[in-house]
Image (spheres, rainbow, N blue to C red):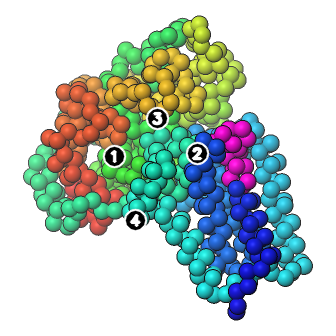
């Protein structure tokens, strides 16, 4: 076939390029909330804008090379280019997070979210606009099917291959920008950086498709240097030599109850605001210390992942979500799997949809005998739009009372999930007062959030009160998963001068990161076991701390966690806290050897051949 690039072909390709120039502006207008904002972005970051356009055009070239029909390729490309930001819009509306490449592995989550999002503001308007674009595309598609017009252009095989190679090469350069020759340097010269520590700013600054493509490399996990069977066996032998056998002091295995309370934090730390009465008197009186969370404002499953496995997100690609990306099979290191082997009945409770964060599959791999989602509750007590913390407490009590075996319960509450509108609750028990000069909208949002804190405090007091009078030995660990996101770009915390003002985290020091990652932690038992002395503790250290208090025999793997926790109890990307309470941005030199062993064993158990599985028995 001869390749004749006539005027019609030229006009078609020119039209497609102009179309994608306009479409990217439309996508950014949709996501940023205004056409003016999108135009300003395209003018101030012209290179970034054009690179986003070329991502869409490269996809179109690939489709042209594969299908060899201009209109069909054009329609398919547009469907993809439009659908992804639409999904991102819905996800951000509900979870406060953009769409990441690994979300596509769980596409059903996006569709399941849609009914919950219908009531969100601007969704109806957005759907009308999206529907209009898709209607135009469908008319073109139907026209193609019925009329079967003469192709706009027909490409010979060598041009088709050229289109695929050119398009795929450009897309691959983004996906593998860290290893693609000179790509990372070229992006830096164009002022394009993958802002992995602040994904909201990453998407705003680099455009949806720029950030989306740059994030793809985070889905790829390579073995760390030094990983081998012999290396893991050496680590395990050392741990087995060090492990100490422990039994419960009472001769009984106590119930172990974890309550990870959604967005629980102490709002009275915002000293410019006033609260009447104290929203968390019980927890304040009994607080053990602080949990140093790896997340802020979202990413609950990443905190949960650390607690239940002892693994650290620090050893995973920035921005990754293990529940969605990595947990695909039985995880022998998971706490429920281990405790089940000791005779525990293992139960997970989360009063929301079971598909959320892929929990329905992850919990099976972790070894939970049962998972109670929102559909598992009969006539539950609601507080606001979600099942209440009070109901979670009642369910925990009912299930422990009904079980003949010791219970391991991991409960994740939902009541205080983001969405702190003025009408979230009918009545408010705590009055909040904003200082002069602070927009009252933040006082309204804070009041709704603080009501959730108040209810969580009451629910925990009820739970502890029950087991104070119970003859069943019981250990309770209560903590917040992360601070709440109230206002974009940490707005509430900045207007309250809790952290420095300025774009994003640019003005923060290590102390600011510590404050913005610290949630209240309470450890308790009813059989007079010593409460661990804790200042700050990362979620990956909660298992060893609770096992020590419970008198449970620990697997050898926990010896490594315990040794690491002694030297580095606080371990997040943004800030690390050593055993003396010193803050650092990087892992100190005297901890690096142990950190490397930790990383190797985690990789082996999560991704590798599980040479070290004897360490978790």
Q: Nearer the viewer, mark 1 or mark 2?
A: 2
* SS at badge 1: helix
Of residues 343 and 545, the one drawn nearer to the viewer in this rendering: 545
Tell me whether circle 1 and circle 4 mark residues in contact (CB < 8 Å): no
Residue 57 horizontal/vertical position (percent) = 65, 64
Say which residue label 4 marks. Answer: 181
Q: Is residue 421 visible?
A: yes
Q: Going by the image, does 278 lie left or right of 451?
A: left
- Magenta stretch in the rendered image: 22-41
Task: Give the spatial CA distance, label 1 vs label 3.
Answer: 15 Å
Residue 168 horizontal/vertical position (percent) = 54, 71
Q: Kindly identify the residue that appears in the image at 77 percent across and 45 percent down.
A: 126
Residue 247 horizontal/vertical position (percent) = 19, 41
Count of residue discs: 4
Say which residue label 3 marks. Answer: 296
Q: Residues within 10 Å of mark 1 (few under 14, many from 20)?
A: few
Counting residues from the N terminus, which is met first, the one under dot 2 or under dot 4?
2
Task: Give the spatial CA distance, label 3 vs label 4.
Answer: 34 Å
Using the image, tell me which numbered label, if any, was put on residue 45: 2
Task: Give the spatial CA distance, label 1 vs label 4.
Answer: 27 Å
Counting residues from the N terminus, which is met first, the one under dot 2 or under dot 3?
2
Residue reaching furthest to the front: 7
Say which residue label 1 marks. Answer: 314
* SS at badge 4: loop
């Amino acid at each position: 076939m001869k390749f004749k690039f006539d005027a019609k072909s030229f006009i078609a390709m020119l039209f497609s390029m102009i179309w994608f120039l306009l479409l990217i502006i439309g996508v950014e207008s949709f996501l940023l909330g205004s056409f003016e904002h999108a135009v300003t972005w395209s003018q101030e970051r012209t290179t970034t804008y054009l690179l986003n356009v070329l991502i869409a055009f490269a996809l179109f070239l690939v489709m042209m090379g594969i299908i060899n029909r201009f209109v069909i390729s054009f329609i398919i490309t547009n469907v993809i280019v439009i659908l992804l930001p639409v999904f991102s819009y819905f996800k951000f509306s509900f979870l406060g997070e953009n769409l990441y490449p690994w979300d596509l592995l769980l596409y059903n989550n996006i569709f399941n979210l849609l009914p919950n999002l219908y009531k969100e503001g601007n969704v109806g308007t957005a759907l009308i606009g999206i529907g209009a674009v898709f209607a135009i595309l469908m008319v073109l598609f139907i026209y193609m099917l019925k009329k079967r017009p003469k192709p706009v252009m027909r490409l010979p095989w060598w041009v088709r291959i050229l289109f695929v190679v050119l398009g795929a090469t450009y897309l691959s350069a983004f996906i593998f920008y860290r290893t693609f020759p000179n790509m990372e340097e070229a992006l830096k010269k164009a002022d394009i950086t993958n802002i992995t520590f602040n994904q909201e700013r990453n998407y705003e600054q680099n455009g949806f498709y720029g950030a989306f493509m740059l994030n793809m490399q985070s889905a790829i996990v390579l073995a760390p240097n030094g990983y081998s069977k012999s290396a893991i066996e050496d680590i395990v032998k050392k741990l087995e030599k060090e492990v100490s056998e422990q039994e419960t002091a009472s001769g009984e295995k106590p119930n172990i109850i974890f309550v990870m309370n959604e967005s629980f934090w102490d709002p009275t730390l915002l000293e410019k605001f006033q609260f009447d009465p104290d929203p968390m008197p019980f927890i304040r009186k009994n607080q053990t210390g602080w949990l140093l969370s790896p997340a802020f404002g979202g990413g609950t499953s990443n905190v949960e992942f650390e607690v239940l496995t002892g693994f650290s997100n620090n050893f995973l690609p920035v921005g990754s979500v293990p529940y969605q990306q990595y947990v695909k099979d039985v995880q022998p290191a998971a706490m429920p799997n281990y405790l089940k082997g000791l005779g525990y009945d293992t139960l997970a409770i989360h009063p929301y949809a079971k598909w959320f964060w892929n929990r329905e599959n992850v919990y099976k791999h972790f070894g939970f005998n049962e998972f109670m989602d929102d559909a598992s509750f009969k006539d539950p007590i609601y507080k606001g739009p979600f099942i209440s913390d009070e109901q979670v407490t009642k369910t925990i009590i009912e299930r422990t009372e009904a079980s003949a075996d010791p219970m391991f319960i991991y409960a994740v509450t939902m009541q205080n999930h983001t969405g702190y509108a003025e009408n979230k609750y009918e009545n408010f028990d705590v009055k909040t007062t904003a200082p002069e000069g602070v927009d009252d909208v933040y006082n309204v949002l804070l009041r709704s959030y603080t009501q959730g804190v108040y209810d969580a405090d009451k629910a925990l007091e009820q739970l502890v009160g029950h087991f104070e009078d119970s003859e069943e030995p019981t250990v309770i660990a209560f903590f917040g998963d992360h601070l709440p996101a109230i206002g974009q770009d940490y707005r509430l915390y900045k207007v309250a001068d809790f952290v420095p003002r300025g774009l994003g985290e640019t003005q923060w020091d290590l102390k600011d990161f510590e404050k913005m990652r610290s949630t209240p932690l309470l450890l308790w038992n009813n059989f007079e076991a010593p409460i661990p002395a804790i200042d700050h503790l990362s979620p990956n250290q909660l298992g060893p701390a609770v096992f020590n208090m419970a008198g449970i025999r620990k697997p050898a793997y926990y010896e490594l966690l315990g040794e690491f926790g002694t030297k580095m109890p606080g371990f997040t990307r943004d800030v690390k806290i050593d055993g003396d309470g010193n803050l650092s941005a990087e892992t100190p030199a005297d901890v690096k050897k142990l950190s490397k062993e930790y990383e190797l064993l985690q990789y082996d158990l999560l991704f590798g051949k599980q040479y070290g599985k004897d360490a978790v028995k």
